[in-house]
Amino acid sequence: MKLLIASRNSDKIKEIKMIINRLDWEILSLSEIAPDLEIIEDGKTLEENARKKAEIVMAKFGLITLGEDTGLEVDALQGQPGIYSARFAGEKATYQENVKKLLELLNGIKNRTARFRCVCALAFPNNLNIPTQIFEGICQGVIIETPKGNSGFGYDPVFMPEGYEKTFAELPIEEKNKISHRAKALLKVKEFLQKIDTQFHKIGYSKDLS
Ligand code: IMP
């Protein structure tokens, strides 16, 4: 089976490939097949953005396509930055600029609880007759005051997952990929794909999955 990831974010693609980890599935990303394709993320929810990415890319390339959108929701900021996580400090903001703005807004605030929410959309070629499927994964934690660790990306240096004394950026990537929002959503994606892979193989329809 071929699975196309509707993303050019190399940090995300690396994690998605590690988590899905099926040697018999070919996992491609936009970086490899359409590095210039821009999809405007103008949805009002993570689901709208994930669905839009998956469906536009599926319609263009005709492959089973995964769209993914993630947001960091901070309770003391009424769920911000949420869908604006990538551009919190401005349209072209770097990870560091976004983290700096977050820490400034939380300066002096005691309640540091937050969660990462990841929504994955799977869009299928029309001949498979499967509507777009939505999967969600959540990871609870707190925002610490000073960034720690060099692993991961984005807000990882300031996000300490519940039950841990280390930030995502201090944990080995294999450990983050066991407990993260993305891992939880992708586990559901993987189960769904395994189910249809088996079903299509049984009825000799596997050709259309590739
Ligand atoms: P988007 O899903 O491409 O809109 O990106 C959302 C933004 O959230 C990214 O630019 C990162 O800053 C951040 N982000 C997404 N996933 C993670 C993660 O696993 N750890 C830390 N930050 C993340």
Image (cartoon, rainbow, N blue to C red):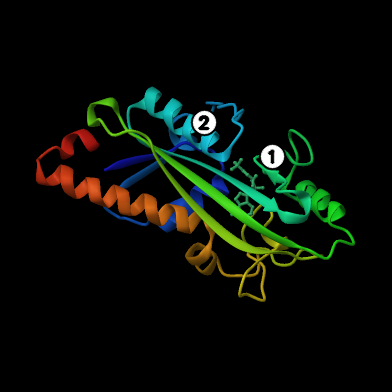
Residue 14 at what x, y percent from top left? 50, 52
Occupied quadrant, residue 151 = bottom right
Horizontal side of 101 relative to 120 (left or right) equals right
* Vertical relation: 20 (above or below) 148: above
Residue 50 at what x, y percent from top left? 50, 37
Q: Disc 1, ligand 1: is the CB inside 8 Å?
A: no
Q: Classify mark 2: residues with Cα within 10 Å, few (<14), some (14-19) or many (20+).
A: few
The mark that comes first in sequence, 1 or 2, is 2
Residue at the spot 43% in from the left edge and 57% down from the top edge: 19
Occupied quadrant, residue 75 = bottom right
Residue at the spot 16% in from the left edge and 42% down from the top edge: 200
Q: Amino acid at mark 2?
A: Pro
Residue positioned most to the top: 60
Horizontal side of 161 relative to 91 (left or right) equals left
Occupied quadrant, residue 173 = bottom right
Q: Secondary structure at mark 2?
A: loop
Q: Secondary structure at mark 1?
A: loop
Q: Amino acid at mark 1?
A: Tyr
| Residue position for label 2 | 35
Res. 84 mark: 1
Task: Name the foreground residue: 157 vs 137.
Answer: 137
